[in-house]
Amino acid sequence: MKPAAIALATLVVASATASAVDYASQIVPIFRAKCYECHHTSKKVKGDVDLADDKMPESIGAGKHIVPSEPKKSTMLIYCTLPDDDEDVMPPKGKNRLSPAELKLLETWITEGASLTAGGAAPTAAAPAAGGAQKWTSADGKIIEATFVRLEGDNVVLTVTATGTTHAVPLARLSPESQAQAKAAK
């Protein structure tokens, strides 16, 4: 594999980070940009799904739209990942769809327990020891497992677990969470 292809593959970084997804700073902005038009008390409430902060607890729990720790049973995530031509897809009619990175963040938040408290829930798995393999996320939501080696200027040097090869990846090509992960690891 050519270095450029490997560097691109390295950008297929993981969604999990050492810290939990924060509802207020990471999930609410997605809801605000993609969902509030139809699912917020201040606008209108379609399908009995109100994403206003004071109404969110009504959507979380067994048998509800968000099933904590079970993204595959969470209709909110399921509907957001349906094909554009499916009549149940959200947002409907292909407008303002969630990006792969936003979908992965929503999935991770649900997996971590869908906490509404500041700072989120504790991660489901312990953070790897310094120098151990971690999952990294690219800006477009792709995933890979790699070991942090060092920061070199505006690049993070990672060793890809699957291949054992080491590559310098521009920090700007990583998700904000993985950028923070790299900066914290230095």
Image (cartoon, rainbow, N blue to C red):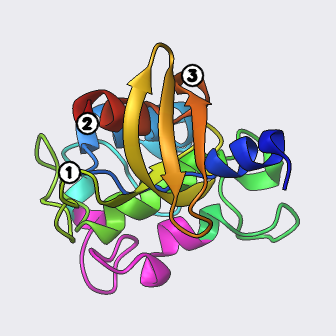
Could one spot residue 43 in this view of the protein? no
**What crowding class fits label 2: few (fewer than 14 Cα within 10 Å), some (14-19), or many (20 or more)?**
few
Q: Are marks 1 and 2 in contact (CB under 8 Å)?
A: yes
Q: Is residue 75 part of the magenta span, yes or no? A: yes
- Which residue is the site of mark 1? 130
Residue under label 2, please give it.
Answer: 185
- Residue occupying image coordinates x 47% and y 56%: 146
Q: CA distance from mark 1 to mark 2?
A: 7 Å
Give residue 172's mark.
3
Q: Which residues are magenta?
A: 58-78
Q: Nearer the viewer, residue 184 or 130?
A: 130
Are the residues tagged 3 and 2 within 8 Å (C-beta)? no
Rendered residue at 57%/57% (across/down): 143
Question: Is label 2 in a helix, a strand or a loop?
Answer: helix
**Residue in the image at 49% along x and 44% along y:** 158
Give the quarter of the figure containing the C terminus.
Answer: top left
Vertical order, 81 against 12 (above or below): below
Rendered residue at 50%/52% (across/down) = 159
Asked whether residue 10 is in view, the answer is yes
Residue 80: where, in percent of width, then height? 62, 61
As drawn, the label of residue 24 is none
